[in-house]
Structure formats: C-alpha cells, structure tokens
Amino acid sequence: MRQVILDTETTGLNPATGDRIIEIGCVEMIGRRLTDRTFHYYINPERDIDAGAFAVHGLSREFLSDKPIFANIVEQLIEFVDGAEIVIHNAAFDLGFLDNEFALLKRPPFRNLAPKITDTLLDARQMFPGKRNSLDALCERFSISNKHRTLHGALLDAQLLAEVYVSMTRGQEDLSIDLIDYTVGADSTGHTKALPTNLMVLSASNDDLESHQKILAEIAKASKKDPIWSPLNAAA
C-alpha cells in the first residue's frame, strides 16, 4: 500500500479571499514504512503574507520572491501523489487550498488524484474525544520528539505526521489478551484444526526488532509501572 503524507503552509486562512499556498511537503510511505522519496517546494504566491501566518511559519514574501510559482511545480506534484492514499492533518484546510490552486489552473480538483484521503485530525478526535489533537499534542501523546520544530514547516510536519499516523493506526496498545477469539481455527465441533506443515517462518530484521523495542518502551512509559517483561520482573 502506497501512501503520501502531505502538509502545506499558506499566506493566510482562506483561499476564497485570495490566500495561496507558499510551501508544500510530502513524504512517501509504502507498507507503513517511510521510503527515501520526498516532495518539497517553497512557492512564490505573488502576494503578501498575512502577519498571523508569518508568525506561524516565518516565510516572508522576500524569501519566496525567487521561488517557482505553483503552475511550475504542479506536474511534479501530480506525479508524486497520483494513485496514492493521501494522509493529511486537518484535510479540509489543505484540500481547500490545493483544489483552489488547481482551479486557478483550470484543472480538476486535486482531491480527485487520490483513491482515499485520510484526515488524522478527524481520526484523533474519535480516538481522543475532548482532548487537544493538534500535531504537537499528538506528538506528545505518542512520545514523538518534535523539539526541533520551532516554526511550522511543510516537510517537517509531514515527517512528524507520518510517525503520528503509524502510532495511531498500529492497533494493539497494550498486552491484554481478553479479546482473543479462541474459536479461530476450530471446526464445527470445537476441535482445533491441524495447521499446515508448509508455513514459512520469517525472522525479524534489525529494523523490526528496533521498532518492537520502541513500542514496548512506549507501552511501559504509558503504564507508569515496571512491565512484566522487564529484567527485574523476569527474575522474580
């Protein structure tokens, strides 16, 4: 499964009043793992930046004056995202701006490029109702370091969102076995069926083991007590 995690920065809050995209950042994920492919551009909006927006991302009109306009990068953007599931935090905001940029170029809506669009903000509100669900709040909740994020940046935020998305969708959050269905693999009489003898055994890679240890550490931190798999408890 190919996914593109996307973020934008803009001149302001409303494309209907002329605000434009000034930065776009995307990272590619295949099989829930980041690849080395990214897409990142600063874009000349050919207009001023609202003071409130500048305070968020720090991108000035002077800095953007020699950057390409959106029309000059649109084909590369289409090639990068076409056919992939797109993951965005607060998708309505980014899609509104992207669809507007495509409309100005007399193209079909950007959102038509994706077979599926996932909004991690909507998903987070369902998972954590009544709590703060900004990207910073989710990074803190899932123990993802964002100390290097002093200002918003599209590529950095896309990279952080990729980590948040994986944490949000990894499934099991603890070691409870209460929900195991012991009837799986049993026949109509309740007797367990014999397993195939030609099953392939796959050994965990170093990356798999490192990811496993990271998840165990996060579970231990969340439980605020020594886990049963710690050396101390194992010895007991």
Image: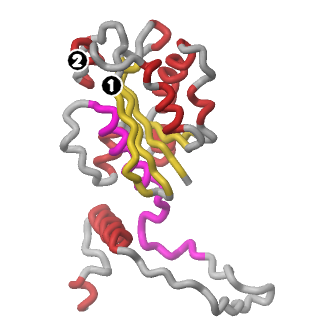
Q: Which label is found at residue 63? A: 2
Tell me if 161 is positioned left or right of 16 in this view.
Answer: left
Circle 1 residue: 42
Secondary structure under the numbered disc 1 in the rendered image: strand
Tell me if 117 is positioned left or right of 135 in this view.
Answer: right
Taking the image as drawn, is residue 132 in sight?
Answer: no
Asked if labels 2 and 1 touch by Cβ distance under 8 angstroms, the answer is: yes
Choose between 68 and 110: the one closer to the eye: 68
Q: Residue at x 40, y 53 (%)?
A: 34
Residues in magenta?
Answer: 152-180
Q: Is residue 163 magenta?
A: yes
Q: Residue at x 63, y 22 (%)?
A: 108
Taking the image as drawn, is residue 14 in sight?
Answer: yes
Q: Is residue 185 magenta?
A: no
With respect to residue 208, does 152 lie above or below?
above
Q: Quadrant of residue 55?
A: top left
